[in-house]
Image (cartoon, grey):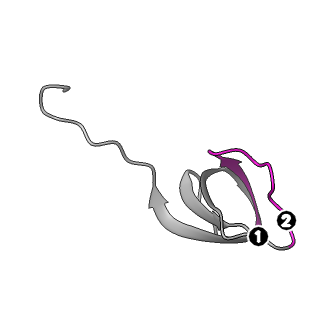
Amino acid sequence: FAQYAEIVHFTLPDGDERSGQVLEVAGTKAIVQVFEGTSGIDARKTTCEFTGDILRTPVSEDML
């Protein structure tokens, strides 16, 4: 099942790839924010992969 803040990869019917992040989970459904926009996404033909990972940003000791 999807988890809050999990990263999602989408593959559109034309082979284009996009990514997003889970904003909310309710049972077997998830609301996902798509980072590159939703134009051209066909809900019936687009596949998605839930990565099990969250968004990470590397930081140096100087930033801390």
Q: Is residue 30 left or right of residue 35?
A: right
Horizontal and vertical percent position of residue 60: 16, 35
Q: Quadrant of residue 42?
A: bottom right
Horizontal and vertical percent position of residue 15: 66, 70
Region in magenta: 27-44
Query: What is the distance, in whole Å, between disc 1 and disc 2 at their CAs?
Result: 6 Å
Instruction: Determine crowd level at label 2: few under 14, some 14-19, many 20+ residues with C-alpha closer than 10 A.
Output: few
Identified at 61% across, 71% down, the residue is: 49
Identified at 64% across, 45% down, the residue is: 36
Q: Is residue 12 left or right of residue 2?
A: right
Instruction: Kindly give the residue lying farthest to the top in the view shown.
Output: 63
Residue 28 lies in magenta, yes or no? Answer: yes
Which quadrant would the C terminus be assigned to in this image? Answer: top left
Query: Which of the pair 22/13 is nearer the observer?
Result: 13
Q: Quadrant of residue 18?
A: bottom right
The answer to whether the residues at label 1 and label 2 have Cβ atoms under 8 Å apart is: yes
Q: Is residue 59 left or right of residue 12?
A: left
Instruction: Kindly give the residue lying farthest to the front in the view shown.
Output: 14
Q: Secondary structure at mark 2?
A: loop
Horizontal and vertical percent position of residue 20: 61, 52
Type of the residue with mark 1: Thr
Which quadrant would the N terminus be assigned to in this image? Answer: bottom right
Q: Which residue is mark 1?
A: 46
Magenta span: predominant SS is loop
Q: How many marks?
A: 2
Instruction: Determine crowd level at label 1: few under 14, some 14-19, many 20+ residues with C-alpha closer than 10 A.
Output: some
**Rendered image: mark on residue 43:** 2
Type of the residue with mark 2: Ala
Horizontal and vertical percent position of residue 63: 20, 26
Q: Secondary structure at mark 1?
A: loop
Identified at 76% across, 49% down, the residue is: 38
